[in-house]
Amino acid sequence: MAGTRGIARFRGEQFNSKIMRNQHFDEANKISENYIDIDFAAHREILENTKIDVFVQVNDKEVSGLDQLDVTADVGARPVAAAIDTEGVVLTEKVQIRLTGTDSPIGDSDSDVVYGRLEENAGAYLLKFYSLEDGVEQPYTFPADAKGIDYRFVIRTSLSVIPVDAIINGGAGFVEGATDAKAYMNLIQLMKDLYGAAGTLDNDGNANLGVSVLQQIANEAQNRAGADTAIRNDFASTAIGKGAELVGVIADPAYAGLTVQAVLLELAARLESAESSLNILENESTREVYEAIGGETGYTLTKGAARQNTMYVYINGQLQTPAIHYENIQDSNGNYTGINFAPDTLQVTQGIPDVLDISYKKVL
């Protein structure tokens, strides 16, 4: 009787074995993990195929006087990592070097970081030391008094066998280009600039300078201002050894002043006087030439009065004598303003006029 037995259902034996396919499952509703039994530990191939570079550290090696070190025993039987997917020693990476027991890098003569490079030959490994000189990699030899070093090199391994402490002990510290190396070396450089070649980094948290650099700068600015004021005061002083003497002007009969300003004023006055005399010499010598029209009994100077006893009169090139051939006409100051030769006159003979030529020192 319909409806009393419910909806018909498939029984398990009705499904044939191995007939389930992808199309039987809803892609939007994945099967939960608790319905799948996968032995992930048996599938390590994905970890083995994933390579990772880690550090291997070796401690307390003696390097005094050495430029290389045989580290075959330290490296062991590891092969060279010839490719990105090959496990072994990575020769292309620098070997980081630190002072034994510390994370302190070692510097060369000008504080560049000393590092190493591994070389392999028939299974033997050499660690050679280098530093940069003017930006170029150069071999480095440790001094005879060098202390021991710790170093670490890079190996390429896989995630399947990576040591449990690889990130903590292999990836921490010893990071050239990060804080510990460059910051440390820059601090050495700064310390040498501040304290000189004998300076040291003691790292005790206490100031080594008696006066801070900031206070030294402030003190220097104050001292410079005071010194500048003292220099100005010395220049203005009339005391012996100061004033004009500071710039090489000493007490001398030729000068009355003892300060720079006083001597400059005296020199300026003398220069002005010399310029004035030169102006007189250049302008007082005067000459007048006159051609007669006939009948003139005298001549008046047109360029100004002449100083006494400085006038020479020529008629047709012949020098005339004062008080005999002519007389001088004078003004109230006794200076000559012209000449008078009456009753003689200047003439024009056969169309050729007499020429009057007068030279004198003009009154300025």
Image (cartoon, grey):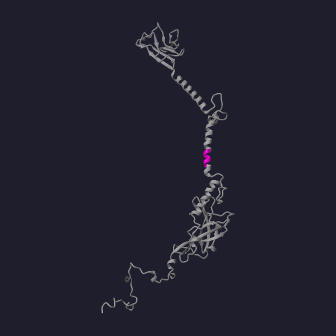
Which residue, as the protein is rendered here, is positioned at the far top? Answer: 343
Q: Is residue 189 visible?
A: yes
Whole-percent x, y for residue 127 in the image: 62, 69
Whole-percent x, y for residue 299 in the image: 46, 12
Q: For the point 61% across and 33% down, which residue is it?
A: 260
Whether the magenta-drawn stretch holds residue 249 is answered as no
Quarter of the rendering containing residue 106 = bottom right
Q: What span is in magenta?
A: 217-222
Whole-percent x, y for residue 239 in the image: 66, 33
Q: For the point 51% across and 77% down, which residue is it?
A: 47
Describe residue 268's horizontal placement relative to residue 35 as left or right: right
Whether the magenta-drawn stretch holds residue 220 is answered as yes
**How many numbered dots are placed on residues in this image?**
0
Which SS type dominates the magenta stretch?
A: helix
Q: Is 299 in front, or is 127?
A: 127
Which residue, as the protein is rendered here, is positioned at the far front? Answer: 4
Q: Is 53 in front, or is 275?
A: 53
Describe residue 4's horizontal placement relative to residue 75 as left or right: left
Assign the N terminus to one quadrant of the image: bottom left
Whole-percent x, y for residue 121 in the image: 60, 73
